[in-house]
Each structure stands twice: as structure tokens, then as C-alpha cells.
Image (cartoon, rainbow, N blue to C red):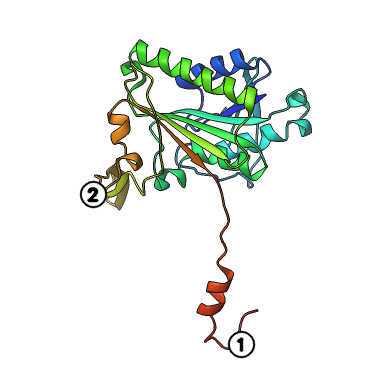
Amino acid sequence: MFLLSNDDGKTPLLDLLFEVSKSVDQNSFAIIPDRQRSATSKAMTFHKPLRLKKIQEDMYTLNGNPADCVAVGLHANQVQELKKYKPEVVVSGINNGHNISKQSFLTSGTIGACLEAVIHGKKAIAFSIDYRPINEYDQTTLTNVKNFVKELLQNVKRNGIPKEIDLISVNFPSKLHKIQIEITKLKNKNFDVELVEGIDPEERKYLWLSGIYHKCDDDCNDKECHHLLNQNKITITPLRLEEKYFINEMKDWLSDLHGRSS
């Protein structure tokens, strides 16, 4: 059974993912934010009540972040209205805007939903597509996206996700007329910070934070960049949250402090 979420709320791309997921496993269900929650990463809501609302069969909204939605969905047995659901794999997206860098990995609410799943011992898949207004994706692209998502979810249902992999980030180009896949790594960042200073109507200064596309250096590895999306290829990045504590290195570094660490 698939548990769906995203960080955009009810959108045509969420509807596409929901339709495909239900066709692969009719027991699938969705819990999504009740409004736009982009760039919330794995932030959670502990300071106000969470309110669940059914908006159609097997689809609910929550007045929280993507990670809240997943936390509620994975603990469905504790919620009277959700007791029938037994989620096995979390599927997040389809996000309008790609997630191909460490920067977006640590910022994206789409990825945050997957991280919440991994922390609770579940596998997860994030789907994203290179940004365009929804009416600018041509029908061939949407059909190919739909077919690929279905094929991938069918494979997950048959074979699961390899135990070495915690989550998979799938990114579609904005134009997909032929299925071509590249296995990739995360690049470092895909946006540079841009600050705009201004004056509000009450003559107070403010800063407006935004981003501009980061251009790759000359020595950039194409397999870590958005170049593959520009070549109209699907990129798939397998990820694992592996702990490396470097305990001995830290002991050495602290050795000159008063009282050696043990």
C-alpha cells in the first residue's frame, strides 16, 4: 500500500500521481498539506492542533507540513478514520520543480516527506519535474511521466526497494518525448541566494530572499547537474541516510582540551 503526500497540496500533478498509485494498488491513500508548504524540509507541527479533512475517497488534507502528513499516515492505526490503511511505501510528489541537489535535499518539503518515512523505517520515492506552469507541459510529456511512474511503482510492488537504498529521488525533464534514464548523484546546489532590499508601505526596510539558477563550474560532472534534464532525460538518484560519526577523529581533535574525552 502506498501513502502519498507532497508539499504543494491538491494539484493536477498530485492527482496524476494519485490516479497511477491507485491503479497499481487500490488500497493506496493520500494525506497532503491543505496549502502550499514548499521549502519546509522535515519541519513538524507541535505547537497547534492538526486537523484532518477528507476531500475525496482515500484523500485527506492536513493543516501541517509534508512530514506531519507522513507521520499521521504512518500511524494510521491510531486515528479512527484511518484505521483501514496500512502504508508500506511513501510516495511524494509530483513536485513542480526539480530536486537534484544537496541544497534541495535539505530544503524541499517533497523530500522532507520521504525523510520522515525513512526515520520510521519505511522506504520512500520522491517524484519531481523541471518547473513549468502546469498548462505548459505537453500531453506527450504527461503521458510518458504517467507511464513511467506506473512502471516504477509496479516494480516496487513486485520487488520492493533494495535494502541498501532508503529513498529514491526521480526527476523528470519538462519535455519527455522519449524514455531515457540516467542514474545520478546529487550536485552541491542548484540555486544561488539573491537578496532584494526594499521599503514597505510603512517605510520600513525589508529583505526579500529568492534564488537564481546556479551555473555549473567548468569541471562539473554532468551526471550531477541539471544538464541531463536539459537533455530530456529522467534522472534517478538513490540515497541512503548513512551515519558516520568519526569518533576517533573527534577524540584526536579534542585531545588538547582540558580533560580528554572518552
Indicate the position of residue 51 as horizontal and vertical percent values: 65, 32
Q: Tell us which disc is closer to us: 1 or 2.
A: 2
Q: Amino acid at mark 2?
A: Asp
Q: Which residue is mark 2?
A: 217
Question: Quick one: label 2, few (<14), some, or many (20+) residues within 10 Å?
Answer: few
Return the x and y of residue 254 as percentages of the image width and height. 53, 80
Above-or-below relation of 35 to 20: below
Callout 1 secondary element: loop
Q: Which residue is mark 1?
A: 259
Q: Is residue 246 left or right of residue 178?
A: right
Q: With 184 as the anchor, is 27 left or right in this view?
A: right
Residue 136 locus on image (x, y percent): 31, 17
Judge whether residue 245 can be spotted in this image.
Answer: yes
First in sequence: mark 1 or mark 2?
Answer: 2
Given residues 225 and 126, the one toward you in this image is 225
Residue appearing at x 56%, y 49% in the figure:
241
